[in-house]
Image (cartoon, grey):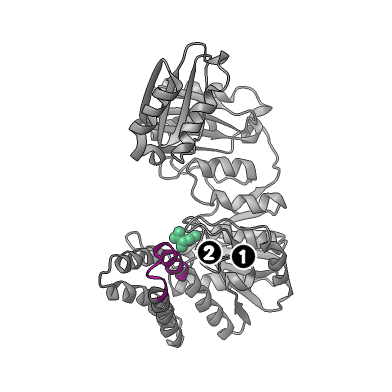
Amino acid sequence: MKVLKFGGSSVANAEQIKKVLQIFNSEAERKIMIVSAPGKRFPNDIKTTDLLLRLYEKVNMNLDYTHKKAQIIERYRDIVRDLDMKEDLLKAFEDTLDYYIEHLKDKPSRLLDALLSCGEDFNAQLLAQYNTLQGYPTQYISPKEAGIVVTDLPQNAQVLEESYEKILSLRNYSDKLIIPGFFGVSRQNYRVTFPRGGSDITGAIIARGVRADLYENFTDVSGIFRANPTVVKKPQVIKEITYREMRELSYAGFGVFHDEALQPLYKDRIPVVIKNTNRPQDRGTFILHNREIDTKTVVSGISCDHCFTVINIKKYLMNRQVGFVKKVLGILEDYNISFEHMPSGIDSISIILRSHQIKDVEEDVLNDIRRKCSVDDLNIEHDLAILMVVGEGMHRIVGTANKITSALAKANINLRMMNQGASEISIMFGIDVKDANKAVQVTYNNYFN
Ligand code: ASP
């Protein structure tokens, strides 16, 4: 059995939806499909999810929201009309929006999740109805019926293990099934959304739950590139990549596949393939438990993520002080801040954070560290980018770091920090944001060309 997931651009209009259903109907094993909300039809278009967000903002500010609501219904009206379907569904969609606005307007974060969920929910209903009309019996299954039970954290849901037992019974349906992505239902019976881009997560949960042989994740590119194609000219497409490599690349900015979607898959080693809705004949990129490694494929990909901040702490004889780091991390915990990396020297330690985490409380955090940890020197640097070179082969093959650092040195790029985890899947370099694109270009060229 295969589980398929189609992203927003794949279901943005009637023409794309026809392509999607042709793919879905082309094989009997393609039994379950997860859909996103209609995405952008052209570069400056607005995603339906963003329209829903704007609707929420208007409602929440007690402003007139009729225009916003109409804009959303129009997106679906265009699709319904171009597919020659009856408009009854639109009335039901509008009633649903009204219902949530009426019943949840005093619970803003609940209202937001309920409205956001409508983008995928309406689309799944629409596609299931259309496919059935075309002669392929297809059922819409809501996340609640499917059994996706999640934590009760608005916009940040996580699936609960108990979900999987019920999801398995989706195998018993003889019809094809279409499930909306991006949300589940909490034990408190609220719709709760995953983080943005979270339809990938739904696909992964369902693929694991039904013990799929393959999770086909369709998007608008023919696989995962070794580097960002807007930075590097015509980068190679990766043929195979491991879950661990993918996790590291997604973490550092590869947006093709949601990093949280890997967790359910890698437990049961469900293989994933990233494919192109517009070119389904292309092989795509497989994400697997293991891959073949030869000298040409030591490194899988190179990415660079911006917006990091570093706190540098110096304290003479730090290595002899028991509990020093615990104190520092305790302060971050007080402010509910998680850190990303923590390279250390004998008498110094640097804490790398995503800048948005500390932005509003920077002064307070620094003062607390000064006060509670009696440090010798403390400073903070902004505008750090992290260049990440990822490859399972690095722990066996000598010379990768050398190839990268020499390329960076030739391009006169200053390395502010280097870090290689014990797993040796990736090497991370801290550089100035202004050097980020150049760093990716020179390392890519030195490595792959
Ligand atoms: N529609 C949601 C978003 O735009 C989820 C998704 O497309 O995966 O973030």
Q: Name the residue at the top extreme.
A: 317
Q: Nearer the viewer, residue 446 or 439?
A: 439
Magenta segment, which residues? 103-118
Which amino acid does the dot numbered 2 rest on? Answer: Phe
Visible residue check, residue 207: yes
Task: Determine the main secondary structure of the stretch shown in magenta.
Answer: helix
Residue 109 lies in the magenta stretch:
yes
Earlier sequence position, callout 2 versus callout 1: 1
Residue 183: image tag:
2
Residue at the (61%, 58%) spot, across then down = 159
Q: Is residue 282 left or right of residue 48?
A: right
Q: Nearer the viewer, residue 155 or 251?
A: 155
Residue at the (45%, 28%) spot, across then down = 430
Residue 148: image tag:
1
Q: Secondary structure at mark 1?
A: loop
Q: Nearer the viewer, residue 224 or 176?
A: 176
Visible residue check, residue 446: no
